[in-house]
Amino acid sequence: MRLLSAIAFLTLLTLAFAADAAPTPSPRQIDIPLSSGTLHAQLYKPDGDGPFPVVIALHGCGGLAGHSEPVQARYRDWAEQLLKGGNAVLLPDSYGSRELGPQCRVNVKERRVLARRERVADIMASREWLVQQPWAARDRISLMGWANGASALLWAVRPQLPSRNIEPDFRSAIAFYPDCRISSGLGWSARVPTLLLIGAKDDVSSPPACRQMVDGARGRSALARIVVYPSAYHDFDRANFPLHAIGGTSDAGLPEKGHVGTDTEARADSQKRVAEWLGR
């Protein structure tokens, strides 16, 4: 009898672990019309008819896809977190849609996809597609971006954006370690609540420029808040990514210099803050 009880307990425990380790549902490819060409995107959507809040998630300079997967593990990880919160997640592929690989080490003058131009166009096309979907909550579409994608986000929420009068506007925006140096010099402000998360030791982006940018927006902007994690470097929210210097690597999906790596405390705190910000 004791043996049977032990077996039953182990069976229940195994099933519980299996449920916790259930894989993220596979995304569905979406094709979104652009003024020139087609924007391919990957969609994660909760079961049911909705309407669901939606996060447009913007990849960094390494691109969206992995070697054999349509979405890199780092973005699948966030998609899983956002799905658990009841959000649908749309990930536009700004590089793959234009038959480009990673753009981290491409000279600025040679880049064919710019954060302030093509990537903003991708953001607006994604929103236009979403507001036509019956399962999407039109008044709860938010933006979230990493590095180059976060820089594009900063351009997309500026009051000067020509298409800003399209209603409803974005609900909110969350930027992970953008390059704030240009935006700071241009007197950046936002028309929607914007949260910026960055590590104090980030030597790929520029924490002082981001602090200056957000502080300079006070009094002439929608709510803009910055959180600087004291011990964190670039890519601090990426799971299981040991801290290391970039120099000398041949990985085209990484910036040319600096340090990247997980900071477990900052990662956990950012997950909490993202859920709170989206739930506002």
Image (cartoon, rainbow, N blue to C red):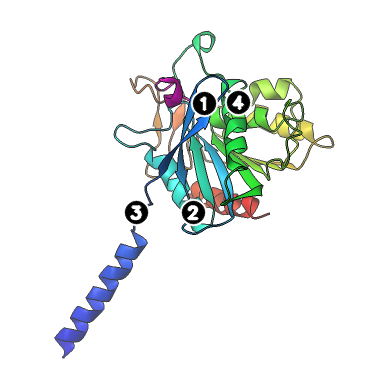
Taking the spot 76% from the left edge, 36% from the top edge, the residue there is 191
Amino acid on which disc 3 is placed: Pro
Lower sequence index among marks 1 and 4:
4
Residue 23, numbered circle = 3
* Residue denoted by label 2: 83
Q: Quadrant of the N terminus?
A: bottom left
Tell me if label 4 and label 2 are in contact, CB under 8 Å. Answer: no
Residue 244 image offset from top left, x and y in percent: 39, 32
Q: Amino acid at mark 1?
A: Val
Residue 125 locus on image (x, y percent): 59, 31
Q: Secondary structure at mark 3?
A: loop
Residue 264 place in picture, x, y as percent: 46, 48
Q: Nearer the viewer, mark 1 or mark 4?
A: 4
Tell which tag, 4 or 3, sits nearer the viewer.
4
Residue drawn 54% across the image and 52% down it: 87
Query: Label 3 to label 1, Cα distance in Å?
Result: 32 Å
